Amino acid sequence: MFVNIFLIFCKNPFSKLKVTYNEYDLDKNVNYSKGDRWMKKMGQVFAACIFMIGALTPFSHSANAAAITVGDAITNNSGTATVEGYIVGYTLSKDSYTTEHDRFQTTNIAIADSVLETDPANIMPIQLTPSVRPGINLVENPDNIGKKVRITGSLEAYFGEPGLKNPESVMLIDSIEPEAPVEALDIHDIQGAGHISSYNNVHVKNVEGVVTHVVDRNNFYMQSIEPDDNDDTSEGILVYKKSHGRQKGDLLSVNGIVKEWVLAGYSEKLQTDLPVTEINADTIVIKESGHVLPAAVVINKDRLIPTEVIDNDQFRHFDPEEDGIDFFESLEGMLVQVNNPKVIAPQKYGEVVVLPENAETNTRAGGLRISAEDYNPERLHLDLNDEYFVAKTGDYFAGNVTGVVSYGYSNYKMLVEDVPALVEGGLKPEETMLHSTKDGLTIASYNLENYSAASSNDKTNRLAAGIVNSMKSPDIIAVTEVQDNDGPVDSGTTDAAQSAAKLITAMEALGGPAYVYTDVAPEDKMDGGQPGGNIRVGFLYNPGRVQLAEGMKGKATESAEFVNGRLTLNPGRIDPENTAFEDSRKPVAAQFIFNEERVIVVANHFNSKGGDQPLFGKNQPLVASSEIQRKNMAAVVNGFVKKVKASDPDANVVLAGDFNDFEFTESLSVLKGSELTNMIDRVPAEERFTYSYQGNSQVLDHILVTNNMAEMTEVDIVHTNSSFMDEHGRASDHDPIVIRTTFAADENIQYIEGKKKEKKLIVAKPGIHLDIDKDARFRDGIVVKHSATLQGEGLKYNVVIISTPQRGQVIDFRGAEVKEVRLDTKRKVEFIGAENVKKWTNSKAKKTKKPAS
């Protein structure tokens, strides 16, 4: 839409900022006027300009002097001048400004040429001497933020940067006001088909609606009782009036000024969030009490919610049928209903994210996974305002939920008063199928979520149980978010030995191995994360299974290299002083020995997505600025792998950790290069997630292996945390990943599966001979990637999936009866005993012809 935001600070407990929008073309960045449209629509908006004078001083001749811009005043900061600009905040110190009311003082303001300005280089501090403070200072006049001001004074350094001191005159220049209120408007006229009302800043009169939801003592929503026939125009609107005293069912007539407001949000909300259309009421007349509420719009019945596109036209076209962001805007302030909502993520911050019962999920847990083309606009945030409400992925409500569509914290949401009973969906934490074997090395990645010796015993025991029981005690665990010994206490300590020891002791108590921990301690407060916590990456390894190769442990600023098949520092950081890792975790490489095989594991924790713009924000497409650093990090780590492989083409290298980006992003593409395989890509789509954010299941954690290891490696994401709350036993906010790499032995291994029911068996080793037990059950089948011999009564009850990438493979069933063979390969495969297969299917599980024996 067309916006030029005037910011005005919080004025009530609803935590909202007053925002006045003038017309501005975000696409072409030029002025754009809708005045003609206003006149055409109502013919009652006058072109008179009324300038509101604040804090007039005797120096009126100075106020009338020709004004210069803030930019000119910064560039030529000397002499006496009159400067015009917008008040954008209060000056705290050099290059530091705020709009937080509790930090204001009466001594200064900060101005800029644009009310949207956030770059300190374009903001100028203005001294307020005692004589000009009344009517101007932000302590007493927080609504002055966003107003245009004309100031005459001495251009000179203030707070050590170009400023203005000793002002002679100050004058506030208010925006255009209509001379008379506009009557005969309905709510849908005010809302219009778009994100910004055409009546913004217009005084309206006798707008009727019935109260549908009371937010607090100063705010309520009302909805028209006579809707139009245009689904693009909302029938609901927010009304602000201090101590309004209204209740649900009151039929009202409201007079006031239409405003566009940014409601509750994060500190950067004025730069990122959409506004909500509101009437700032001066008069409210009660026409009737106890009026029947309008019928709620039933989502996915009365109106179909878009399921793929959030926005694809940068707000140039208002298209609620295609764009999710427009769909919700068309319902802003209205009563809506969701039938028997399905919970797709655990409750957080008092909100539960759901889908209507007739909407599809795409994870086995009952969640909604993102893809490169689809960030799931159909997610509905139920704002229950109850952080104690317990719900997890896969649960559902036994009844319909009704609420009013609002916006806050960068998302549309439903303000809900009551919900029906929540039904347990049955989702349970998983256990991995990948355990260590004689020739199978297991390696895991696990984000421990700010774990330290200061963490509670409950968290410690949950992490320990997850590693020992759910992850089956992997041989090597690349851990992230390990804090120093005293956690977030800013004591200057960086050592984490006590933190690791506490967790290791808990694992031993549960029957786990006596793990050894190693890391490279960071410099104090140099790696980001929780202040004082000094989070880092490290390794837990089982000395009964693997050995840490001989070598000297590196220091925080030392860089490990690969020379003559060995790391020069073990463990050692990778290029720790590279600017790519500034204020973030530095990757640590460690070389281990397993069955005489040397394996280098690199633990990683890339920078977070903090600072990225929101999916449902006012900037479309959003800017993911944090990705720049991750791509730089990825290039450094991939460069390390390149050097290792150039020195030893047969070297085994594993990259593990929290990479804070999705499998389809450029960051992961850079990291993978041509040397590595991301094992996450081999996880079935319905299980491919390690984290949940605002109802979107997604992958942030990855394990990559050099290509020479890929065909010998299996992978499993162990879903124990991201779909659950603490009340369900959650230990971290990330799910761990486990891989098993089977290194070739001289003889074939007869691999016999027992009675346990597991998700999948992957046959990755060429020439293996398997005897499948009669009680073995693999929900996702037995995946065969190379020539193999399969026998045993268990084949009667399992699907065998042929997924070999190579020609000339031979699958020998040894006369055993096979339930089904699915051909998920384009390569020609020879079968021995094909006559015993009861069903042949293609990659889409559709019946197909039996291949030649």
Image (cartoon, rainbow, N blue to C red):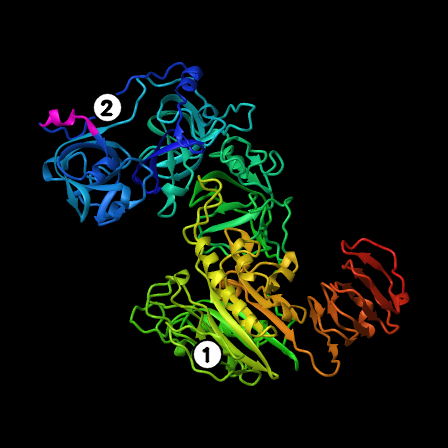
Q: In screen coordinates, is 581 left or right of 701?
A: left
Q: Is residue 418 visible?
A: yes
- Find disc 1 in the rendering and name its residue: 568
- Element at label 1: loop
Can residue 699 be seen by looking at this rendering?
no
Tell me the quarter of the picture where residue 744 sits.
bottom right
Which of pointers 1 and 2 lies earlier in the amino acid sequence?
2
Task: Give the x, y percent position of residue 656.
Answer: 53, 68
Residue located beneath label 2 in the image: 51
Q: Horizontal and vertical percent for residue 758? A: 69, 69
Give the structural element (helix, strand or loop) at label 2.
loop
Q: Which residues are magenta?
A: 59-67
Residue type beneath disc 1: Thr
- The three-letter amino acid code for the residue at tag 2 is Phe
> From mark 1 to mark 2, how far is it between C-alphas?
72 Å
Of the pair 228 and 22, the residue shown nearer to us: 22
